[in-house]
Amino acid sequence: MSEARRPLGVGLIALLLAASAIVSLAGAAIALGAGGLTLPDAERSGSLLVTAAYVGLAAAQVVVAWGFWTLHGWAWNLGVALQALNVVVGLAQILLVGVTGIGLQGLASIVIGVVVIAYLLRRRVLDAFVLRSLERMDADDTRRGTP
């Protein structure tokens, strides 16, 4: 069986997810008031919830980035789900505040989420994840001594 190669786009998405995780952690630090930066009073009341969301998002992004980099099949599923959630959150931002300010971020989330999902659904990309998963199963069978 030929060895699965990571498509260039999957590697780029993995790196962007890792970078986004760093930004999410910076958002968590800001929500907690690190470095003298503080949120306005209206937003500060929910800062623990916001911080938890930023940290959770960062953790999910790191896990998916590692899974993409190593072509784990579960990462493909989780990555599609994460991007679908991104699209839903983007729609909610636009519906709540319109296409100004944070709504523009929502529009960007929608566009990026749709583009990433479309890319992950490409046959060559999906085949790379499946082929790598099959290679792992073969390696497991060889270690166990099963034919």
Image: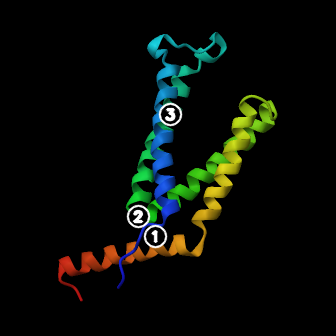
At 47% from the left edge and 39% from the top edge, which residue is drawn? 21
Per the rendering, the mark at residue 23 is: 3
Q: CA distance from mark 3 to mark 1?
A: 27 Å
Q: Nearer the viewer, mark 2 or mark 3?
A: 3
Element on which disc 1 rests: helix
Query: Image quadrant of residue 106?
Result: top right
Query: Image quadrant of residue 140?
Result: bottom left
- Decide if residue 83 is on the left or right side of residue 92: left
Q: Residues within 10 Å of mark 1 (few under 14, many from 20)?
A: many
Q: Is residue 92 above or below residue 50?
A: below
Question: Marks 3 and 1: CB-CB under 8 Å?
Answer: no
The quadrant of the rendering that contains the N terminus is bottom left
Q: Residues within 10 Å of mark 3 (few under 14, many from 20)?
A: some
The residue that mark 2 highlights is 72
Element on which disc 2 rests: loop
The residue that mark 1 highlights is 129
Question: Marks 2 and 3: CB-CB under 8 Å?
Answer: no
Mark toward the start of the polypeptide (2 vs 3): 3
Q: Residues within 10 Å of mark 2 (few under 14, many from 20)?
A: some
How is the rendered protein coloured?
rainbow
Mark toward the start of the polypeptide (3 vs 1): 3
Q: How many marks?
A: 3
At 60% from the left edge and 68% from the top edge, which residue is drawn? 121
Question: Marks 2 and 1: CB-CB under 8 Å?
Answer: yes
Q: CA distance from mark 2 to mark 1?
A: 6 Å
Q: CA distance from mark 2 to mark 3?
A: 24 Å
At 53% from the left edge and 71% from the top edge, which residue is drawn? 126
